[in-house]
Image (spheres, helix red, strand yellow):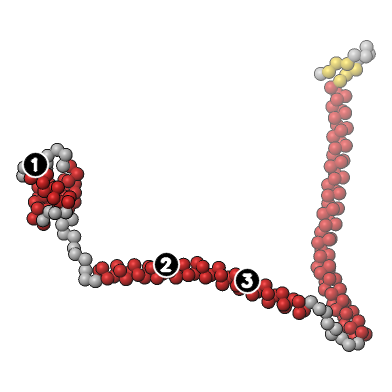
Amino acid sequence: MKEEDLKRLIDRYYSGESTEEEEIALRDYFRKENIPEGYEAEKVIFGFYSEYEDIPEPSIGFEARILAGIDASDRQSASLKLKKYLLPLISTAAGLLLLAGSYFFFVSRAEPRDTFKDPAMAYAETLKILREVSLQLNRGAQVLEPIGKMNEVTKKSFETINKSTRMVQKNLKSLDYLKNSYNVKQYPSGKSINK
């Protein structure tokens, strides 16, 4: 194929005016090894077409399935947008409703009411409740007694260790005195010589 014919066919191909026979001729031409200089990109393009000639046609209903998938995706994104705006609104309304309900609940219970008509009965019931609280506190204090004993034992142990440490330090001081007196000897002239 002459280079002028090749250039004309490629121009027709890129402008979208080439026929199927012309495209087949271009594919066949670019399969060979020796091509004119400057047509390396076209060799790659038509080489790709030659390699993938046997790409199967899409199945029947392929386009309909793609469009249905796109529609489903659009519906899902619409429901996500609805959730995006509706969920915070519902959450805010629920919070306000909860606050209003708790306000009315506590305001209605805020006023003390007399449960006993007879003051002596009220006093007796109060004493009964206070005794029960006292018993529970005493039980709790009894449970903590062993911890207090452990604390006393620990304190006595530390005192014993401190006494032992003081005795050892005292004995070490006397040993230091002996060591120093051994190293220094006194002569009659009053001079001392250290060894």
Q: Tell me which residue sits at (52%, 70%) in the image.
A: 86
Towards the viewer: 31 or 155:
31
**Viewer can see residue 32:** no
Q: In terms of secondary structure, where does tag 2 sit?
A: helix
Disc 2 crowd rating (10 Å Cα; few below 14, some 14-19, many 20+) is few
Dividing the picture into quadrants, the one containing residue 138 is bottom right
The amino acid beneath tag 3 is Gly
Q: In terms of secondary structure, where does tag 1 sit?
A: helix
Report the quarter where the N terminus lies. top left
Residue 83 appears left or right of 48: right
The amino acid beneath tag 2 is Ser
Disc 3 crowd rating (10 Å Cα; few below 14, some 14-19, many 20+) is few
Gap in angstroms between the C-alphas marked 3 and 1: 80 Å
Q: Which residue is denoted by mark 3 in the rendering?
A: 95
Q: Tell me which residue sits at (17%, 50%) in the image.
A: 14
Q: Which residue is denoted by mark 2 in the rendering?
A: 77
Q: Which residue is denoted by mark 1 in the rendering?
A: 3
